[in-house]
Image: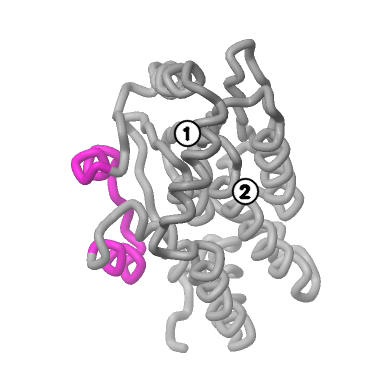
Amino acid sequence: MGTTHTIDEQGIAEVVMDNPPVNALTVAGWFDLADRLRALGRDPQVRVVVLRAEGRGFNAGVDIKEMQATEGFDALIGANRGCFEAFAAVYECEVPVIAAVNGFCLGGGIGLVGNADVIVAADDATFGLPEVDRGALGAATHLARLVPQHRMRQMVYTAKPITAQELHQQGSVAEVVPQAELREAALRIARDIAAKSPTVMRAAKASLNGIDPVDVRRSYRYEQGFTFELNLSGVSDEARDAFVAKRDTDFTK
């Protein structure tokens, strides 16, 4: 369990998240994922990365239980920094990254997928940002890469998810397939990329990042500032405590 990776003879790297029960990553888990992605991007043998998950869903964001069980703000700061590094590692990985999404993709999962180069999804996949229900903000930067501006705002305000089929219609998801075919769908695209000149593919990745209209690192860091404010106000602790205790949140503040 945990996050692992393999590299095949074609230079296709598979990074697999397997953190039961819901693939919510600990602070160490986010940094580990970031380190793996950066190392794979630097490896001259690697031509493309497939990022996928085992279990019920692709990613459920940060481990809120770890955060609430840790005294002070160390876990909160660690989670923010870990997410920042992992999202950036997907974006800055020197080769294309294909995200293969099964089940739910929530919170931090949106940060990973929104920064990926290609997305394929299982027909049961849903994508959402429940942050406002947890007293936090973040990854709207990455959600805005998946949906139009006003849909993004609606999703942030309501915390309601969107389906893989809807994202496919909007052009964000390349393919929607039965879950049993998800890995092969991602590998099929990966083989197409791996068959091309690795020098050209690395140049293409750098070029596309260079013409991006939004600085995703700075934009996400700006969002994180509001999360810190919410934590200092006490709203976030109430929302996270309610989540862990499985009770309704007191939204009077």
- Left or right, 187 with respect to 8, comes to left
Q: Nearer the viewer, residue 236 or 184?
A: 184
Predominant secondary structure, magenta span: helix
Which quarter of the rendering shows the N terminus?
Answer: top right
Per the rendered image, the range of residues in magenta is: 151-171
Image location (x, y in percent) of residue 55: 54, 30
Image location (x, y in percent) of residue 249: 48, 73
Q: Which residue is mark 2?
A: 89
Q: Which residue is mark 1?
A: 98
Query: In the rendering, which numbered label is found on residue 209?
Result: none
On the question of residue 162 being in view, the answer is yes
- Left or right, 142 with respect to 47, comes to left
**Amino acid under disc 2:** Ala
Farthest residue, direction top: 9
Q: Nearer the viewer, residue 35 or 191?
A: 191
Q: Is residue 118 magenta?
A: no
**Amino acid under disc 1:** Ile
On the question of residue 54 being in view, the answer is no
